[in-house]
Image (spheres, rainbow, N blue to C red):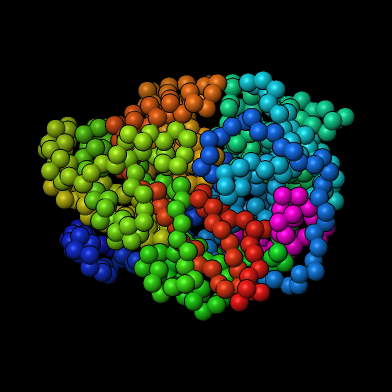
């Protein structure tokens, strides 16, 4: 869909809003419901968040040697995974989209891995040890090879970390936020180890490295141009890419010479021999493909399709925070009264029932309740139109006609356009407010959201998910720090608190400062806080899979369920 203003008029939006409040089904010109596949903002360190308190204290008992080569005697098991969008590149460091992370997770590996229970598992590092507040030592497994035959070395680890963390080294990685504190590297070839040193204490360093930062071959990257790296993959993972078309199709087959990550192979994985990830932007079409047996795994299902999917459907809670962001440095959003008025004007409970069957967790802060640093004393803003109008009357813009453009990606989240239209209609219940919804292609909007504040829309809907399960690293630094890649304001108090938390020497101290920052963010309301989205996945009777709360997907953990039927 081309960028441009929605065709829904103010009167049509009011009609839709009244129907929403009464629970009626609505179809409005220009408001095609239940679109999208959640190709959305993702935190720089993507991966399973877990729910346990992060710690660097655990040291693995993992072996120093690579595991056994994967057996292929289970027969052919080819599956199709249907998503709302596709991977945008094969370079694991030069992107920040969930679909790309999901595709790469089958091809590339990292030092450590956070499993579905929140526990850190050794991966390319066989063990690790915190030497002091600034240094962590990782012992790198021997016998691990990349798909092209190159052997993994500590120098590959150093190169990979530096490529992401250092903006002056190769590329400017969209994933750098969580790793730029890493500034020192010490390799011990006799021990096959590397020490990573941070400029300031970082009690979450191990957890961050277990949630992201794929390891690449230094020789391979240096032998290929940036353009070639976008279309050629060379990892250590259990699958190799056989076909790739940007934002459309990703096909991979099991690599028979895979070195054999013990945690994975001891559980009998991977069982998939070949998979196809296909991009289908419309949620209803994805659901139809699942019903027709044309897709084994289908994600980002809209609530409107829940009933017809029946037993194929599995609902689960995620850490994906959805919001409307307001540029606090421009009119009328430079008024905290206006920003708060907008929060009071949105009926979250009705939206939740309408779009998620009441399954969303309503938000008054960005930090999910199952994360370290969540402030349990903060409640969502209640729906109170009288309070919204009173706050507007107290603002500097009480007598102004406020005309706004609310930007939203279409085809990025299930029901994304419907939700944006509904929120716009609720805001227009404030008499001097008019909101025009601007429908955007996801790629065009997302590219601006990663740039400077001045180049971003003044008002937009988006979401963010995938992180280490901790407030600062997961949400606050990127989204609310003055220098964060996803920020839309420059608030000195919030930035100072985030910096203080980053320098904390214990998890407990960091969590307490995070809670204080969350309270400031709630009170100053730079966002219209919406919810942490539930998600739904449709599984055919051929497969079994346990979803992760951060929505990360691991093809190597898909189980062959054909024998159970």
Q: Is residue 484 above or below residue 505?
A: below
Q: Is residue 197 above or below residue 358?
A: above
Q: Position of residue 313 (x, y in %)?
A: 47, 67
Q: Position of residue 221 (x, y in %)?
A: 75, 44
Q: Nearer the viewer, residue 229 or 87?
A: 87
**Quadrant where the N terminus is found in the figure:** bottom left
Instruction: Name which residue lies at 12% across and 38% down.
Output: 390
Whether residue 279 is visible here, answered yes or no, is: yes
Answer with left or right where residue 426 lies relative to residue 365.
left
Q: Nearer the viewer, residue 191 or 251?
A: 191
Answer with left or right where residue 433 lies relative to residue 74.
left
Give the image quarter of residue 343.
top left
Instruction: Name which residue lies at 51% across and 73% down.
Output: 290
Answer with left or right where residue 538 lies relative to residue 32.
right
Instruction: Name which residue lies at 34% across and 44% down.
Output: 363
Asked whether 483 falls inside the magenta stretch, the response is no
Whether residue 328 is visible here, answered yes or no, is: no
| Residue at the bottom extreme, as displayed | 292
**Quadrant where the C terminus is found in the figure:** bottom right
For the image shown, how many numbered marks are present on the structure?
A: 0
Q: Position of residue 348 (x, y in %)?
A: 27, 50
Give the image quarter of residue 302.
bottom left
Instruction: Name which residue lies at 83% across and 54% down.
Output: 68
| Residue at the right extreme, as displayed | 190
Specify start and end residues of the magenta stretch as a single range. 240-269
Q: Nearer the viewer, residue 50 or 30?
A: 50
Q: Position of residue 486 (x, y in %)?
A: 45, 39
Q: Is residue 30 above or below residue 439?
A: below
């Amino acid at each position: 869909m081309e960028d441009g203003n929605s065709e829904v008029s103010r009167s049509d939006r009011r009609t839709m809003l009244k129907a929403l409040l009464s629970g009626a089904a609505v179809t409005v010109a220009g408001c095609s419901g239940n679109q999208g596949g959640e190709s959305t903002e993702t935190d720089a360190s993507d991966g399973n968040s877990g729910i346990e308190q992060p710690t660097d204290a655990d040291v693995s008992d993992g072996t120093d040697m690579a595991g056994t080569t994967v057996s292929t005697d289970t027969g052919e098991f080819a599956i199709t995974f249907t998503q709302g969008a596709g991977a945008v590149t094969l370079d694991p460091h030069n992107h920040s989209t969930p679909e790309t992370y999901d595709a790469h997770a089958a091809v590339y590996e990292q030092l450590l891995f956070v499993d579905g229970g929140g526990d850190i598992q050794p991966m390319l590092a066989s063990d690790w040890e915190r030497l002091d507040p600034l240094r962590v030592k990782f012992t790198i497994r021997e016998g691990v090879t990349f798909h092209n035959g190159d052997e993994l070395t500590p120098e590959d680890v150093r190169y990979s970390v530096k490529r992401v963390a250092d903006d002056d080294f190769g590329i400017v990685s969209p994933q750098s936020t969580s790793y730029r504190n890493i500034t020192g590297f010490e390799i011990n070839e006799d021990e096959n180890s590397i020490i990573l040193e941070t400029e300031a204490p970082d009690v979450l360093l191990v957890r961050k490295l277990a949630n992201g930062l794929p390891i690449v071959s230094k020789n391979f990257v240096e032998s290929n141009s940036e353009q070639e790296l976008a279309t050629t993959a060379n990892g250590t993972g259990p699958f190799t890419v056989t076909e790739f078309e940007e934002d459309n199709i990703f096909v991979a087959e099991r690599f028979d010479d895979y070195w054999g990550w013990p945690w994975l192979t001891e559980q009998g994985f991977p069982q998939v021999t070949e998979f196809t990830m296909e991009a289908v932007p419309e949620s209803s079409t994805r659901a139809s493909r699942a019903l027709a047996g044309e897709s084994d795994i289908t994600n980002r299902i809209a609530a409107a399709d829940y009933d017809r999917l029946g037993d194929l459907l599995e609902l689960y809670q995620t850490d994906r925070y959805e919001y409307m962001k307001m540029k606090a440095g421009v009119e009328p959003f430079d008024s905290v009264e206006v920003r708060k008025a907008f929060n009071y004007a949105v009926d979250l409970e009705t939206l939740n029932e309408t779009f998620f069957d009441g399954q969303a967790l309503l938000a008054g802060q960005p930090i999910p309740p199952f994360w370290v640093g969540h402030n349990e004393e903060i409640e969502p803003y209640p729906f109170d139109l009288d309070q919204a109008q009173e706050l507007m009357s107290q603002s500097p813009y009480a007598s102004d006609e406020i005309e706004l453009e609310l930007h939203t990606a279409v085809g990025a989240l299930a029901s994304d356009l419907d939700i944006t239209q509904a929120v716009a209609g609720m805001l227009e219940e404030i008499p001097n407010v008019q909101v025009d919804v601007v429908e955007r292609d996801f790629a065009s909007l997302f590219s601006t959201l990663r740039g400077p504040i001045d180049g971003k829309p003044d008002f937009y809907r988006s979401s963010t998910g995938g992180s280490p399960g901790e407030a600062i690293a997961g949400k606050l630094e990127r989204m609310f720090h003055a220098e964060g890649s996803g920020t839309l304001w420059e608030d000195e108090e919030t930035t100072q608190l985030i910096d203080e938390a980053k320098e904390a020497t214990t998890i407990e101290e960091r969590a307490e400062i995070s809670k204080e920052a969350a309270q400031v963010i709630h009170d100053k309301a730079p966002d219209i806080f919406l919810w942490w989205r539930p998600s739904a996945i449709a599984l055919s009777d051929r497969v079994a899979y346990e979803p992760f709360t951060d929505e990360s997907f691991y093809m190597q953990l898909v189980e062959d369920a054909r024998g159970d039927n």
